[in-house]
Amino acid sequence: MSENELIELIEQNLENSPMIDTETGIAAVKELAKIAEKEKIEWALAGGIAMHLYGSPRLTKDVDVVSLKRLPLEKVRPLGFGGDSYEVAVGKKKINVDWIVREDNYRDYYVQALKDAAELKNGLRVITTEWLAILKYIAGRDKDLDDIVFLLRKKNFVERDLIRQNVVKTKNEDVWFAMLPGWQRLFALADSAVAERDKYYLDPMR
């Protein structure tokens, strides 16, 4: 393979890569934020791009936004858990933004997470670390649980009691006690009290 062919191949791979960087993800969100603000629709960043803002090195393929209403746009597809996926052009890339509008038993958590979201100086809104952990706990995939441990490991980053308070104020103490064994396992992993293989961060064993 010649040098020119190698360069062309790399450029094609970069252009067609399913993974996105923080800057590209934020640019996509800002385009949809203009529409949301015009329609007076509240929104906040969640998911992988929010994890990037909180220091995570894990790659992501799309952008997650939590909201209470859908946007008046043509959707790529509906989301199984509520909401729609939209496609946004950023340069040569087409970015999928999952606009999450929960319409099930978990809706109350998303409503409260949105109420408590922080607004950055650049106008971006992002859910707090505690709420990000809770929403990832609800999602429950391996990568979500790894993300929770990542957040919990960062010193003075997540107030663990505030996780409990958020669950209780959204639901009740009984719901928190039902969740507690799962949270205790995650706290133990974060504190290195137990070791399990994770899949998405640098150390193969914690």
Image (tube, helix red, strand yellow):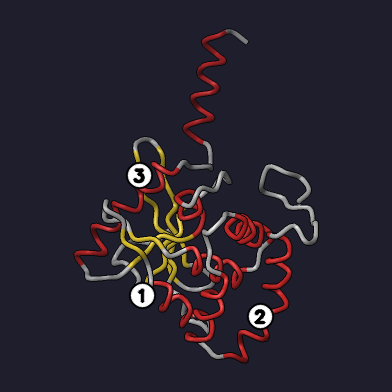
117 versus 54 height, above or below: below
Q: Nearer the viewer, residue 185 or 5?
A: 185
For the point 36% across and 75% down, the residue is 115
**Residue under the point 48% across and 73% down:** 82
Q: Residues within 10 Å of mark 2 (few under 14, many from 20)?
A: some
Residue 146 location in percent, x, y? 66, 57
Which structural element holds mark 1?
Answer: helix
User: Could you tell me residue 11's position as x and y percent?
Assistant: 49, 24
Q: Which residue is mark 1?
A: 115
Residue 134, percent from left and from top: 55, 71
Q: Alpha carbon of mark 1 to alpha carbon of mark 2: how far?
A: 22 Å
Q: CA distance from mark 1 to mark 3?
A: 29 Å
Q: Amino acid at mark 1?
A: Lys
Secondary element under disc 2, as helix, strand or loop, is helix
Marks counted in the figure total 3
- The crowding category of the residue bearing disc 1, from other C-alpha atoms within 10 Å (few below 14, some 14 to 19, many at least 20), is few
> Seen in the image, is 63 located left or right of residue 118?
right
